[in-house]
Amino acid sequence: MAKRTYGFNTMALHAGQEPDPATLSRGVPVYRTSSYLFRDTRHASDLFALKELGNIYTRIMNPTQDVLEKRMAALEGGTAALALASGTSAVFNSIINICSAGDEIVSANNLYGGTYTMFDSLLPQFGITAKLVDPDHAGNFDQAVTEKTRALYVETIGNPVLQVTDLEEVAGVAKKHHLPLIVDSTFTTPSLLRPIRYGADVVVHSLTKWLGGHGAAIGGVVIDAGTFDWTDPRFSTFNQPDRGYHGVRWAHDLGELRSQAFAVRMRLVPLRNLGACISPDNAWLFLQGIETLPLRMERHSSNALQVAGFLRGHPKVAWVRYPGLEEDPSYPAARKYLKNGFGGMVVFGIKGGRPAGERFIEGLRLISHLANVGDAKSLALHPASTSHSQLSEGQQIAGGLTPDLVRLSIGIEDARDIMNDIEQALAD
């Protein structure tokens, strides 16, 4: 694959894989093994000393996982990737790979509920502060940066209110202060948006969602753009000798792997020592999903646009948010960044507030009521009482989440069947 340039659809099927040398298998094998033989004592020592690359222990890496990581790096246009046990662990490991006690990050406030709680409640236990700002104006990030700031963090499309972030504007702030920009691109996937092209230094995904696409496994992935200069002394985790790994200075001592310093350190420090590893079986399941990602994202986006248009004109609907609607506040940014579709998420407010929302969700027959997004099947949730219930009412409102908001993850069923189910549930 490295000998020529291929299109996105081709890479989704082939990137990162060479035929299995033992069996010549066309499909990616699942390597269900915890550990790997060393040829001799020198080989073992060289692997641990980073003088040679190879398999040691599946907590650190696995051949099935390696294909997944190479494929995701290729699809995002990054230099390396690291798969982890969940999207949440991908976010957490990205932050602690950069930050130490006393450091800060500046983040958008329109976050997935689990990420919001991690930043608001968990990171402070480690001495790391997250400042949460309205992402609609890049100046808010600029004003919040201090000498303690070590990263900026945004989601491409906020969960659940669906604001589209102007990545170039936020990336401009990051570059002004020489800070890495971490972008959670779960809601867009590389099929719709490749954040590295617009200035992201690190891209995070929950593999559980559209990349897997079938609600069959949990996992996350982090892609290292290889664009950030970690030799800035402010980033102590990359410049001070690491007493936990032979005194290596990750920004200086990796030789040919220096452009992958972020990914290499994350693998050998947070992942190796905290253990949020992905299983080989889950890595294999995600590879199956990625093969059909471009086709599914086309249908998700097409169906969601039809559903949003249907809801916009419904007498029992108070308001609708979908980036593909011309009247949506995020439409200018969506048109700028989302060239292949506007995604599979639609949110709306139902007249009658929370009681009406509960009746609607309980009246659905085709659409599943559960706490996930990105399945091939359509899904529904009331975030204020579920996925974002740990936020206070004030925090919910600050992030744009109102009590009447219903979140729909639009699947790839026939669009008419989805709309018929919504119609009959609204009629109850």
Image (cartoon, helix red, strand yellow):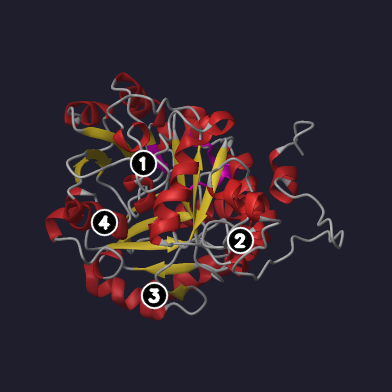
First-in-chain label (2 vs 3): 2
Could one spot residue 139 in this view of the protein? Answer: yes
Mark 4 or 1: the one toward you:
1
Residue 359, percent from left and from top: 32, 78
Q: Residue at x 27, y 41 (%)?
A: 107
First-in-chain label (3 vs 1): 1
Mark 3 or 1: the one toward you:
1
Position of residue 149 relative to residue 45, above or below, is: above
Q: Considering the numbered disc 3 on the image, is that residue within a helix, a strand or a loop?
A: helix
Q: Mark 3 points at which residue?
A: 427
Q: Mark 2 points at which residue?
A: 286
- Amino acid at circle 2: Phe
Magenta part of the chain: 182-195
Look at the numbered discs 1 and 2 and tell me whether their residues touch, using CB distance below 8 Å.
no
Q: Name the residue under label 4.
A: 118
The residue lying furthest to the front in this view is: 41
The Cα–Cα distance between marks 4 and 3, rounded to whole angstroms, is: 39 Å
Q: Name the residue under label 1.
A: 242
**Of the pair 261 and 197, the residue shown nearer to us:** 261
The quadrant where residue 314 appears: bottom left
Q: Considering the numbered disc 1 on the image, is that residue within a helix, a strand or a loop?
A: loop
Mark 1 or 2: the one toward you:
1
Residue 194, percent from left and from top: 53, 37
